Image: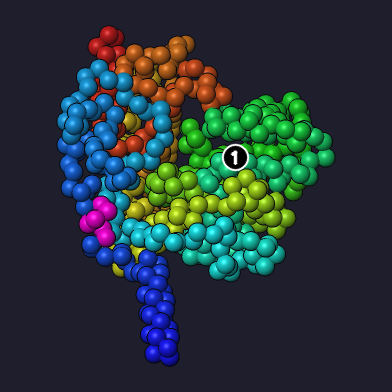
Amino acid sequence: MAAREMILSAAVCLCSIAAVRLMDLYWDSPSPGPHWMERESGPALRASCSGHGRVFNDGSDLACECSDCYTGVNCSELQHGCMVDADAGDPTFLEPFWMEHGADAGVFMPSWYRMGYSVKKKGSSPAHKELPLVYVIKELEDSIRELHELVGNAVVKDKYLVLGTGSMQLVAAALNALSDSFPEKPGAVVTRAPYYMIYKLQVDVLSSSKFQWGGDAVAAFEKKAFDPSSVVELLAAPNNPDTSILEPVYKGTNAKIIHDKAYYWPHYTAIAGALDEDVMLFSLSKTTGHAGSRIGWALVRDIEVYKKMFMYIAVSTIGVSRESQLRAHRLIKSVLDGYQNGGSHKARMFDFGYHTLQSRWQTLAEIFKASTRFSIQKVDSQHCSFFKKEVSPSPAYAWIRCEQEEDCHSIFAAAGINGRPGRAFGASNRYIRLCMIKRDDEFELLAGKLQALVDTELTNE
């Protein structure tokens, strides 16, 4: 009997050691191993799809999912007369980078990985001592803070970090927290036009006795439509859709501003310095391009605002998917390694993203340079503290104005281009937003149709 117990004890010990080693593998090693990568990604990577599609190993048939306007078993057939989709903002322009560096950021996840609701290993944030449950994996919080310090786009010292299912959930959490102190209710949520259309849609859905949609911030301020102490201003900079960087309309010590900094990364704009605002929102979607993981985070100065935002996330979704958190950590760690550990220039994600978008912007700027019917927004070159040099424009979107009194969206649709109309952003129908952050082949189709549109204009003059 004693011998059996000794054997059982030894077996348990060995299993424990193996489990610990398995944990070490997916946290500490560059990848869990070539056999895992080959099993999970090999067939997908080897499928060519004619260069116009991707294969995703979702556990079903490994069929090509084609880029816009391509079809066929291997996506080799171009659909002539197809409408190019420049509406959606999928950041798939970073796909080639991650396909080349996939082994560095791949995730091995055992079936028993974090099955519980909360995380026992708490991070270093002092706020964790005041809250009974933790939903953020310590390693992810640490890597996010380290990324901001590397890029120099936000002050993380003395800031609390709130994790959300995408930045839109964090907008809701911040609105809920900040509106608690409104002396007059319902208060107003405002933003400067042109604004990100989801702001209005979200506020309309969440509209309650605490706050309602108040429209354009400039108009509301000039008309003194609301008590300033009962207003929350949403401020995106760089702005979506026109990529401008503007100051808040409502200012002062009592101003309540939610700073949406989703695009304040060096592949989209020059980094002027580390921002130190009360509430700043960021997303994995626009940082690494992984929109499907639905990860966003807020850096919050005030402990009470942090607690209210935390409780909103806790009550609405009981935290954020641990699987997504693990993937986000691995992705961000890979980005950090590209800059910190002597990685080659090709392994630097922000460099890759910047050069891709800068080239695309140059292409569109040249196309519209010859037009008098259409104009593209003016974006100046600026010094970037991250790249340590002056950088040319590399915005995520083209904000096009039709110089005549006409429906810009209809004109572009007739030319085979589906953009997002200006009215969706609180602007006039003389504007249209075109997305520049999709796949290379999709951008090439967009550029080709834009060139044809301008060429038709020049021919008819």
x, y percent for residue 28: 38, 70
- According to the picture, the residue beneath numbered tag 1 turns out to be 235
Q: Nearer the viewer, residue 442 or 259?
A: 442
Q: Is residue 188 left or right of residue 273?
A: right
Q: Nearer the viewer, residue 248 or 204?
A: 204
Q: Can residue 39 be found in the magenta stretch?
A: yes
Residue at 34 percent of width and 53 percent of height:
349
State the extent of the magenta-drawn residues as a range.
36-41
Q: Disc 1 on helix, strand or loop?
A: strand
x, y percent for residue 122: 58, 67
Q: Is residue 65 left or right of residue 391?
A: left
Residue at 23 percent of width and 63 percent of height:
34
Q: Can residue 320 be found in the magenta stretch?
A: no
x, y percent for residue 48: 17, 41
Q: In the current view of this chain or complex, which residue is farthest to the top?
A: 460
Picture quadrant where residue 400 is located: top left
Q: For mark 1, does the 10 Å Cα neighbourhood hold few (<14), some (14 to 19), or many (20 or more) residues?
A: many
Q: Main secondary structure of the magenta part?
A: helix
Q: Nearer the viewer, residue 284 or 138?
A: 138
Residue at 36 percent of width and 44 percent of height:
392
Quadrant showing the N terminus: bottom left
Q: Is residue 28 left or right of residue 322?
A: left
Q: Is residue 161 above or below residue 220?
A: below
Residue 32 visible to an observer of this rendering = yes
x, y percent for residue 338: 33, 62
Q: Is residue 259 above or below residue 204?
A: below
Residue 261 visible to an observer of this rendering = no
The residue type indicated by label 1 comes to Leu
Q: Is residue 449 left or right of residue 291?
A: left
